[in-house]
Image (spheres, rainbow, N blue to C red):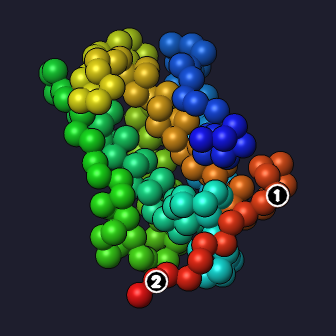
Amino acid sequence: MSPDLEARRYPIGPVQDLPGRDRATLEAVAARMEAAGRAWREALTGRDEAELGRTYRPGAWTVRQLAHHAADAHVHGLNRLRYSLTAEEYVIQPFDQQGWLMLPDAALPVEAALALMDAVNVRWGALLRGLDPALFARRVLHPQEGEQDLWRLLAKHDWHLRHHLAQVRLALGQAGEGKEAVTPPPPQH
């Protein structure tokens, strides 16, 4: 992949470890998730079908698909954390991201994805602000990524919501996030 396409694929860079492992870090992540949810709503409210059909690079998911995927993954991340906190030796259950986008609910208006993000962010915020940071030392097993602590799980889900938001902004040509967007060819029947 060319450096430009790689930069477009990861517009905020790869997932990074969180800078701390304390209550302030949990508060910062909760606040970032809430801000990202508001930014998603701001980016997508009032968009027409042509805009929702744009992609940030050739062959990538559309803006609509990114919104539904981000909402699905945010729910999935919350449930992964909850299972990890309540089940011993929890093994994360990956999901078929492309397959989920083929299900009928992925064709709902983007408002459904935004409403889901809003609701899930309320739960993420309450959970992160109410937990003892020491609980994040618990370990889980991801079948593809190996064993990790809950700080790493949290870092990934904090990053994920902002990562796809940056891709949406690229697709829509929003200031500060890239000017070019790709309009996919019409579907082949």
Q: Which mark is residue 188?
A: 2
Q: Residues within 10 Å of mark 2 (few under 14, many from 20)?
A: few
Q: Quadrant of residue 79?
A: top left
Task: Quote the CA–CA distance across marks 1 and 2.
Answer: 27 Å
Q: What kind of residue is marked 1?
A: Lys
- Is 14 situated above or below 139? below
Across and down, in percent, residue 28 comes to 61, 28
Q: Earlier in the sequence, mark 1 or mark 2?
A: 1
Q: Quadrant of residue 148?
A: top left
In the image, what residue occupies the spot 57% across and 23% down? 16
**Which element is circle 2 on?**
loop
Across and down, in percent, residue 91 comes to 19, 29
Residue located beneath label 1 in the image? 179
Across and down, in percent, residue 161 comes to 54, 45
Q: Is residue 86 left or right of residue 120?
A: left
**Which element is circle 1 on?**
loop
| Quarter placement of the C terminus | bottom left
Q: Residues within 10 Å of mark 1 (few under 14, many from 20)?
A: few
In the image, what residue occupies the spot 52% across and 41% down? 160
Q: What kind of residue is marked 2?
A: Gln
